Image (spheres, grey):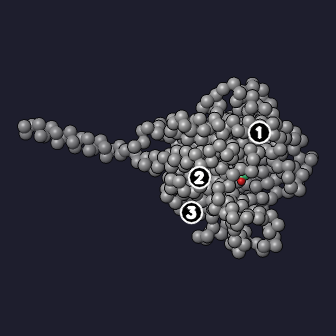
Amino acid sequence: MKKNLILCASLALLTFAACKQTPKEDYGWLKKGIDAASYQMKFTTEEIADSGKLPRSIWTGYDMDFLCRQLDKDPAMFKDSLRIIPTQKIGQRRFCSSIHDWTSGFFPGSLWYTYELTGDSYYKDQAIKYTNMLNPVKNYKGTHDLGFMMYCSYGNAERLAPNDTVPPALIQTADNLIGRFNPTIGCIRSWDFGTWNFPVIIDNMMNLDLLFYASRQTGDPKYKNIAITHANTTLKNHFRPDASSYHLVSYNNDGTVERKQTHQGKNDDSSWARGQAWAIYGYTSCYRETKDTTYLNFAERVADLIMTRVKTDDLIPLWDYDAPDSPETPRDASAAAIVASAMLEMSTMAADGQKYFDYAEKILKSLSSDTYLAKDGENQGFILMHSTGSLPNGSEIDTPLNYADYYYLEALKRYMDLKGISYKDLK
Ligand code: GLY
């Protein structure tokens, strides 16, 4: 009896010591994030049912004095670019203006990620339904945003539920995207509106994944070559010596630079938070596809800039790194989610990958906290709160954005893959 007692006590001690050495990681935040996402995505699909609409954000208003303080400008300098938001719309769910809205691919894409994260076929059925709605986008040539629209929707369909109709839709879209490439300038044209001669915005780096896919799928290197030329021209002209990005560079027909400025940042010389996020994500993709260390080295410089310049303890940046450091300044959860997703990929590539992993994990924990994660059935069904679309245009200020949700879910998936855990392991 005494012997048995001693044996039991020793075993208990050994178990206690083993538990102490390898503490079980607490993934409560992760489960909370995925559960919130599943609830919100289901809630939204049920609410919008067969309306044929794609959720984008919540309509917000703005106060002129607040905008002046944020932009450090007199109203005369920016009032012409402000959107007029009808008062009755404020607080309502904002839908994509049409399937040709640049954000149309994110809602279907979020459904794909929710399916991938949970394994629940409800989300797959919904993802197929909303992805199919975008089919006519394969004929569209009016913007560079075709990668966002089709690769986040059809691109995820290709990964998770491939069928014969998906690759032709993606290749046709890639053909339309490279139709916007100008070989003298060495870039894909971003927008067809405005007074610029040939505008290229940093966001355009996000469309290159579609071109890398198209070369893999067809065996034709032309798509990849155009993506690389675009990335190289952007590397040459879009960045300041500290690796921060201008939002927009417009080119003359001979390839010289016409202007460098902002459209959504505080001013031409500021560092718009989402612009830096698009840059780190885009150059990480370029390294994955080419193994050219120029791109990884550059992505690391952008990462270091972001980590140095962030002003918030929870690492969710202010909407512009040069915005006033004051409690009223809105944050941009979308920029944080994009950075987290990119840094998780970088963590597998960079020599000092752990530092990027740790930073991304901290962002994801912040986004999964009550400060940013919506309560079930609130926030018009979006997952995250507190993003900023285009403050200088008075549009989507401190509101959910469908692309914040998309990159948050992508980052959660990348995180779980790196940790080797699945949803059913999360208790
Ligand atoms: N591509 C537009 C934006 O990031 O707001």
**Residue in front for this viewpoint, 418 or 264:** 264
Image-quadrant location for residue 160: top right
Residue at 69% across, 36% down: 132
Q: Amino acid at mark 3?
A: Thr
- Counting residues from the start of the chain, the first of labels 1 and 2 encountered is 1
Under circle 2, the secondary element is: loop
Q: Which residue is identified by label 3? A: 312
Q: Position of residue 52 (x, y in %)?
A: 69, 44
What is the spatial separation of the Cα atoms under label 1 and label 3, in whole angstroms?
A: 39 Å
Q: Amino acid at mark 1?
A: Val
Q: Is residue 314 visible?
A: yes
3 and 2 marks in contact (CB < 8 Å)? no
In this rendering, the answer to whether 363 lies above or below 4 is below
Q: Which residue is identified by label 2? A: 382
Q: Amino acid at mark 2?
A: Phe
The answer to whether residue 248 is left or right of residue 423 is right
**Residue in front for this viewpoint, 414 or 160:** 160
1 and 2 marks in contact (CB < 8 Å)? no
Residue at 20% across, 39% down: 11
- Residue furthest left in the image: 1
Q: Which residue is identified by label 1? A: 137
Q: Position of residue 213 (x, y in %)?
A: 71, 32
Under circle 3, the secondary element is: loop
- Residue furthest front in the image: 50
